[in-house]
Amino acid sequence: MTYSFMSPPNAGRFVLSNATLPAIAVEGFNAPAIEGLVRADIVIENGLVAAILPAGSAPLELAKSDLREGMVWPCFADVHTHLDKGHIWGRSSNPDGTFMGALQAVGADREAHWSADDVRKRMEFALRSAYAHGTSLIRTHLDSAAPQHRISFEVFAEMREAWKDKIALQAVALFPMDDMADEAYFADLVAVIRDAAGLIGGVTKMGPNLATQLDTLFHAAAENGLDVDLHVDETDDPGAETLKAIAEAVLRNRFVGKVTAGHCCSLARQDDGVAERTVELVAKAGISIISLPMCNAYLQDRYPNRTPRWRGVTLFKELAAAGVTTAVASDNTRDPFYAYGDLDAVEVFREAVRILHLDHPLDTAARVVTTSPADIAGRPDMGRIGIGRPADLVLFGARRWSEFLSRPQSDRVVLRRGKVIDRSLPDYRELDSVVGA
């Protein structure tokens, strides 16, 4: 292993001194903040954070690694991904880059190739990448049209067990809502989700059956103790208002589980009054929203020989201002829905700052890949630096926001339980036998 800018002491008890931390992700430590950043010494003992002290005040007798004001973040949470689709671009590209092109390409690829072995190899590759970048919590949506739901959830269960000491994994069943009309299939799907301790998802679309479908979905979720995570209004059509319908259904059904909506692109295309009423309903219903800035900027408003006129993302700031829990995530990785990406939360954060204008100031921006997604996933024990918590940390040479956001931070150091991990990324050639070069 090589450590690019620093090497923590090989000791059971040591200090990361003169560190810069995103205050929003730090518990139990108060210090003057400059644009949301605080200075501190972090004492690590037996793999846990033993103390967070004012910078330069840690006991002199302890082994130290001087970060020279370099940043220390908690490991990241990435709670809207598609591990089952990942890395199929080599065999199933999307030549026109459109949403419909992606749907067709993925559907054909799934029918032709998604055996357990195929999904397993690509999922493993993706997890190795995310782990090397410093992610410790991932929620993945799994395409769950029959019979794929049984294949992919079985593979997911294997991966969750194999990776339990490295990445906490959650799975959401993704399926067309119209498929609920097949009662036998839907009953089997719910059983698979329940047995896997997963979440029920789905793709909502406008239509005369939407309210009934949502009632059926929330009833099944309530009966089986499932949380809900939906793909919502991933379109530039201002007439797409399924987010509003979801909020109404949550309230109508008095659903008490956690509800998450991803994308919600059309909200930004609607008249201010219409959008404001929906935002109010979302807040009242307690729905969390995840924006996928890289994928939506890639797909939305894409037409031949025409420059896009909007950024493709939801009303992120307005939702947050209304008290809605908001986060950003990777979404797709090297598949027809997004040709790029590597499940690197730093890349997601950098692009989110640019696309969503999370800057000026950046005081609380770090929450969108740390505390907020961890809370959405029901894991408030993750995405934070705090006394008694595991020393699962990502160390950077960057001292200030400008330095952090101007480079990809490829020299970062990742600690898990206070120990440096091997950050070697898997070679794409490993997938050649699966998806081609």
Image (spheres, rainbow, N blue to C red):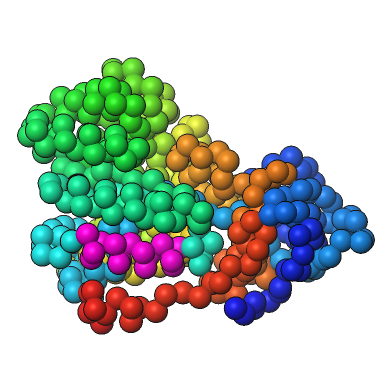
x 32%, y 58%: residue: 83
- Say which quarter of the image contains residue 64: bottom right
Is 13 covered by the magenta stretch?
Answer: no
x 71%, y 66%: residue: 70
- Name the foreground residue: 223 vs 288: 223
From the top left corner, tell me how far across and down residue 399 is, in percent.
70, 66
- The N terminus lies in which quarter of the figure? bottom right
Question: Is residue 244 visible in this depiction of the protein?
Answer: no
Residue 273, placed above or below residue 176: above
Q: Residue furthest right?
A: 60
- Name the foreground residue: 71 vs 140: 140
Instruction: Characterize the magenta stretch by its predominant secondary structure.
Output: helix
x 44%, y 56%: residue: 163
In the figure, is residue 239 to the left or right of 332?
left
- The C terminus lies in which quarter of the figure? bottom left
- Name the foreground residue: 294 vs 410: 410
From the top left corner, tell me how far across and down residue 423 is, in percent.
54, 72
- Say which quarter of the image contains residue 203: top left
* Count of number-bearing discs: 0
Residue 255, placed above or below residue 152: above
Residue 134, placed above or below residue 254: below
In the figure, is residue 187 to the left or right of 233?
left
Question: Is residue 87 visible in this depiction of the protein?
Answer: yes
From the top left corner, tell me how far across and down residue 311 is, in percent.
35, 57
Which residues fall within the magenta stretch? 116-130
From the top left corner, tell me how far across and down residue 220 is, in percent.
24, 26
x 65%, y 63%: residue: 419
Residue 40, placed above or below residue 335: above
